[in-house]
C-alpha cells in the first residue's frame, strides 16, 4: 500500500466511527462507575455492550447524549465532540439518534399515535412543522407489526407490544444511530426473540448503526457484529460473540454462563 492509499484508509476509518469514547471517567461521590472506558462504534454496525447490573451501562448511554457530564474523557457521537455542544446543538444531535429506553417509557396518558408523534413535534425543525405525521407513524408501526394499535392507550397493550411501540418511536425520525437500553429485559423468551428479530430488520432496512446495552446473551449472539464487555469501569474485552465465547479468561466466561 502506498502512502496515498494509507491516508485515504485512515480518513475512511475516521469517517466510519459513529461513536468514539476515550478514557471516560464518571463518578457519583466516591462511586467511581467508569474508570477510563474506551469504545468505538463503526458505521452500520450493531455493537453490544454487556455488563452486570450497576456496572454503568445506562450511565454510559446518558453520557453519549449529554445527559451526564463526564469527569474526564472524550465522547464523540456522529462526528460531534459532546463537550463542545450547546443546548441547541445537543437537541440537533439527539434528533439523529433513536432511543429505546430501559423499560419502554411510553407516555401513559397519550395514545400510541401521540407517543409516536412526540419526537416529531419535539424535533419540528428537522422534520418540518407542516408535514403530515400520520404516514410516518403508520410506517413505523407497520415495521413492528402494530398498525392496528394506532388509537390505543399504552395500558391496553401487553408488555411486548409496548416494547414494539417504543421501538417504532425510536425509528420514527429515521435516525442514523439507535441506542437500545436493555431491549429484551422483562420479556418472555419468545417475545424477546421477536424484538431481536425486529432490531435486525431495522438494521437491514435502514442501515442504521446501533448501540445495544444488554445482559441477554441470546440477544447479543443474534444481533451483535461485535461486543464490548464492561467490567469494573473499563472495556475489559471486546470481539465477536464467537471470539469472546472461546476466550479462556474466567471473567469473560462468566458472561456466557446461564
Ligand atoms: N444520577 C445518578 N446519581 C448517582 N448515582 C448514579 C446515578 N446514575 C447512576 N448512578 C450509579 O451508577 C452506577 C451505574 O448505574 P447504571 O444505571 O448505569 O447501571 P446499569 O449498568 O445500567 O445497571 P442495570 O443493568 O441494572 O440497568 C450505579 O451504582 C448507580 O447507583
Ligand atoms: Mg441500566
Image: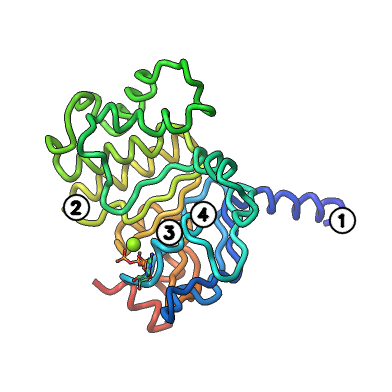
Give me the C-alpha separation between circle 3 and circle 4.
20 Å
Q: Position of residue 179 (x, y in %)?
A: 43, 50
Q: Is 161 situated left or right of 92 in this image? A: left
Quarter holding ligand 2 = bottom left
Q: Quadrant of residue 198?
A: top left
Q: Is residue 153 above or below residue 24?
A: above
Graded by Cα atoms within 10 Å as few (under 14), some (14 to 19) or many (20 or more), the crowding at tag 3 reads: many
Kindly identify which residue carries mark 2. Answer: 187
Left or right: residue 186 compared with residue 203: left
**Residue beneath disc 4:** 66
Q: Indicate which disc, 3 or 4, sits on the residue closer to the N terminus.
A: 3
The residue singled out by tag 3 in the image is 48
* Element at label 1: loop
Residue at 54 percent of width and 66 percent of height: 70
Closer to us: mark 4 or mark 1? Answer: 4
Label 4 crowding class (10 Å Cα cut-off): few <14, some 14-19, many 20+?
some
Seen from the viewer's position, the closer of residues 68 and 242 is 68
Image point (32%, 56%), residue name:
182
State the SS at label 3. strand
Q: Distance of mark 1 from mark 2, alpha carbons?
A: 52 Å
Amino acid at each position: 500500500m502506498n502512502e496515498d492509499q494509507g491516508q485515504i484508509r485512515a480518513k475512511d476509518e475516521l469517517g466510519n466511527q459513529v461513536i468514539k469514547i476515550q478514557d471516560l471517567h464518571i463518578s457519583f461521590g466516591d462511586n467511581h462507575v467508569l474508570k477510563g472506558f474506551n469504545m468505538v462504534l463503526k458505521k452500520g454496525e450493531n455493537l453490544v455492550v454487556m455488563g452486570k447490573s450497576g456496572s454503568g451501562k445506562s450511565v454510559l448511554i446518558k453520557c453519549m447524549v449529554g445527559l451526564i457530564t463526564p469527569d474526564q474523557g472524550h465522547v464523540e457521537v456522529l462526528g460531534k465532540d459532546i463537550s463542545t455542544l450547546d443546548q441547541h446543538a445537543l437537541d440537533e444531535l439527539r434528533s439523529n439518534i433513536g432511543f429505546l429506553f430501559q423499560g419502554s417509557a411510553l407516555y401513559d396518558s397519550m395514545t400510541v399515535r401521540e407517543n409516536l408523534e412526540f419526537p416529531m413535534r419535539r424535533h419540528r425543525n428537522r422534520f418540518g412543522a407542516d408535514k403530515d405525521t400520520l404516514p410516518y407513524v403508520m410506517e413505523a408501526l407497520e415495521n413492528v407489526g402494530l398498525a392496528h394499535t394506532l388509537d390505543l392507550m399504552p395500558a391496553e397493550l401487553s408488555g411486548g407490544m409496548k416494547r414494539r411501540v417504543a421501538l417504532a418511536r425510536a425509528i420514527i425520525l429515521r435516525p442514523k444511530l439507535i441506542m437500545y437500553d436493555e431491549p429484551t429485559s422483562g420479556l418472555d423468551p419468545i417475545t424477546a426473540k421477536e424484538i431481536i428479530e425486529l432490531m435486525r430488520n431495522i438494521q437491514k432496512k435502514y442501515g442504521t448503526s446501533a448501540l445495544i446495552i444488554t445482559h441477554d446473551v441470546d440477544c447479543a449472539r443474534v444481533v451483535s457484529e461485535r461486543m464490548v464487555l464492561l467490567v469494573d469501569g473499563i472495556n475489559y474485552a471486546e470481539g465477536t460473540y464467537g471470539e469472546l465465547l472461546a476466550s479462556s479468561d474466567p471473567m469473560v466466561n462468566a458472561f456466557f454462563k446461564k
